[in-house]
Image: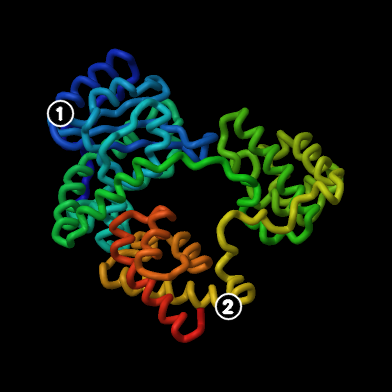
Amino acid sequence: MPLLEPRDGLPPLVVSAEGLASAARALGAGQGPVAVDAERASGFRYGHRAFLVQFRRRGAGTVLIDPVACPDLSGIDAALAGTEAVLHAASQDLPCLAEIGYGPQLLFDTELAGRLLGYPRVGLGTLVESVLGLALEKSHSAADWSTRPLPEEWLRYAALDVEVLVELRDALAEQLAAQGKSEWARQEFAAVLAAEPAGPRAEPWRRTSGIHRVRSRRGLAIVRELWLERDKIARRRDLSPTRVLLDSAIIEAARTLPNGAADLNGVAGFSGRGARRHAPEWLRAIGRARGQSERALPDASAPSSDGPPPAHRWSERDPAAARRLAAARAAVAALADEHHLPTENLLPPDAVRRLAWQPPAPLSPETVAAQLAGLGARPWQVQLTALPIAKALMRLIEKGDA
């Protein structure tokens, strides 16, 4: 059944302090969990700010708030203190909600619940259809939500995103209880709320799409300088970096090493109107990279982290560790199949790699459990996986393969 209209009609967009105070009173007087969603403009604007926030609670109806006009939701936060918030893929929305003053203390994440229950596809529209038999329209999910005024059809779409979120939560909670996974979900939701904001990456320019095609250190220097220049321009103009200059253009410049304006105009991606606007900046960035000494050029590979090397190199560097990793992964995969959930939700892949690279000594279920807990595994994950992983690794020792 298609879900086309909010059951209470489309609410007015809150754009004033008075409207925000009224919305806070209504939400605070409501009953039960509150459905929450946020719309961003990440493909259009710099950063991941919220440009529309939606709430829905029984007894209060749906509230749509323009955080550009109302950038402080601390009154909403106070009104909903102690109220469980229902979000879909909460880790995506919580940071932008925190920026404007809303931070729930209790959480139910419908996407994460769907993963724990073993649903093969956990997008909001798919889950709503699978669990509730309703079809959500998702055609505006990638819209530029920084647009003002917001079109009425977009607001209707946004209101429908929270229309049945609490009903979905209730149905998934019943399924979690039936499968004996309610405590798992509680621990996972608490971990999402407790997660620290991600810190800045040491060398974010290395994530430029296609960088593996750049073979020289001088080319990598061009990637670095163009990436940094693009980021500075994007921040200043409040644009998504890829709307200033595409990754593919940066990579082509790094591969062809243009020398001067004529060469740069011949590189795919630099001849468009938007890129030409900043041609002097691009040329200066390339000039900086060309003028750097060999010592200042970036290394061919990213600096090693404090973790183990990439798993595909283990068989050469440490064959015994590679066998341990294969055994641990097999144990986790078998458990994941048994409990009908993805392996990455049963145990973080990084924890499996670190454990296999440097297992505890002496090796026992207790020491494996302690190490997994130290690596951030939740108690339910440790309880399920420590013994099977320990047994798998001890079998290798007995065979002389570890």
Q: Amino acid at mark 2?
A: Pro
Q: Is residue 325 above or below residue 281?
A: below
Please give the name of the residue rendered at 22% of the width and 53% of the height, measured from the top-left corner: 183
- Taking depth in this image into account, of 11 and 197 the one nearest to the observer is 197
Hey, which residue is sitting farthest bottom in the picture? Answer: 399
Q: Is residue 133 visible?
A: no
Q: Amino acid at mark 1?
A: Gly
Q: Position of residue 213 (x, y in %)?
A: 69, 61
- Taking depth in this image into account, of 303 and 18 the one nearest to the observer is 303
User: Mark 1 — residue?
Assistant: 30
Q: Is residue 96 above or below residue 135?
A: above
Q: Residues within 10 Å of mark 1 (few under 14, many from 20)?
A: some
Left or right: where 147 falls relative to 31: right
Which mark identifies residue 205? none
Q: Quadrant of residue 215?
A: bottom right
Q: Is residue 279 above or below residue 312?
A: above
Q: Is residue 275 visible?
A: yes
Q: Position of residue 380 (x, y in %)?
A: 28, 58
User: Mark 2 — residue?
Assistant: 319
Please give the name of the residue rendered at 77% of the width and 40% of the height, measured from the top-left corner: 285
Left or right: where 91 falls relative to 119: right
Tell me the distance, in whole angstroms, between the alpha carbons under discs 1 and 2. 60 Å
Q: Earlier in the sequence, mark 1 or mark 2?
A: 1
